[in-house]
Amino acid sequence: MIGILALVFAGLAALLHVYIFVLESVRWTQPKTWKVFGIADQRAADITKPLAYNQGFYNLFLAIGAAIGIVLWIANGTGDVAGRTLLIFSLGSMLAAALVLVTSGSKYLRPAAIQGTLPLIGLVLAIFA
């Protein structure tokens, strides 16, 4: 049961990071998106677009790592070293990124909590599964 919960939370974390990818790399210059990230205006969104584009792909790569880990875990069981390792690494990296975000200032506490909660739960469950 713990393994199933680990996979569910890992899957949710991966989906969240794909969504963040879409916001940062695809929709960054749309007003609804740059307002979410606290970007002041269209000019600022245009200036920061290359940075956001790059950052979005980091989120996508973490999501892909988690997804591959999930697939390997499901295909080979909880004893699969490759799937478990990849899943724990990907979730740990997602969590570490959220912790780095916290160091950017107190206004980033909420976004860091959103970004880091699902990976934290999935990571703990995956370790104990």
Image (tube, rainbow, N blue to C red):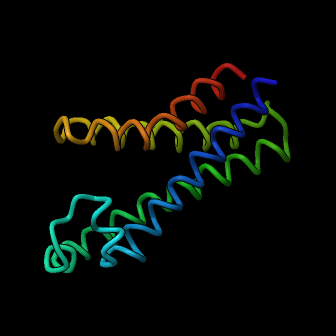
* Number of numbered discs overlaid on the protein picture: 0
> What residue sits 53% from the left and 40% below the top?
91
> What residue sits 43% from the left and 43% below the top?
115
Q: For the view shown, which residue lies furthest in the top direction?
A: 128
- Judged left or right of residue 115, residue 9 is right
| 84 to 1, vertically: above or below | below
Quadrant where the N terminus sits is top right
Q: Position of residue 111 (x, y in %)?
A: 34, 44
**The quarter of the displayed image where residue 4 is located:** top right
| 117 to 43, vertically: above or below | above
> What residue sits 50% from the left and 55% below the top?
17
Q: Position of residue 20 (x, y in %)?
A: 45, 60
Q: Nearer the viewer, residue 33 or 55?
A: 33
| 66 to 35, vertically: above or below | above
- Judged left or right of residue 105, residue 24 is right
Quadrant where the C terminus sits is top right
Q: Position of residue 54 (x, y in %)?
A: 33, 69
- Judged left or right of residue 103, residue 8 is right
Q: Position of residue 75 (x, y in %)?
A: 85, 47
| 36 to 99, vertically: above or below | below
Q: Nearer the viewer, residue 60 or 22?
A: 22
**The quarter of the displayed image where residue 85 is located:** top right
> What residue sits 37% from the left and 67% below the top?
24
Q: Nearer the viewer, residue 84 or 67?
A: 67
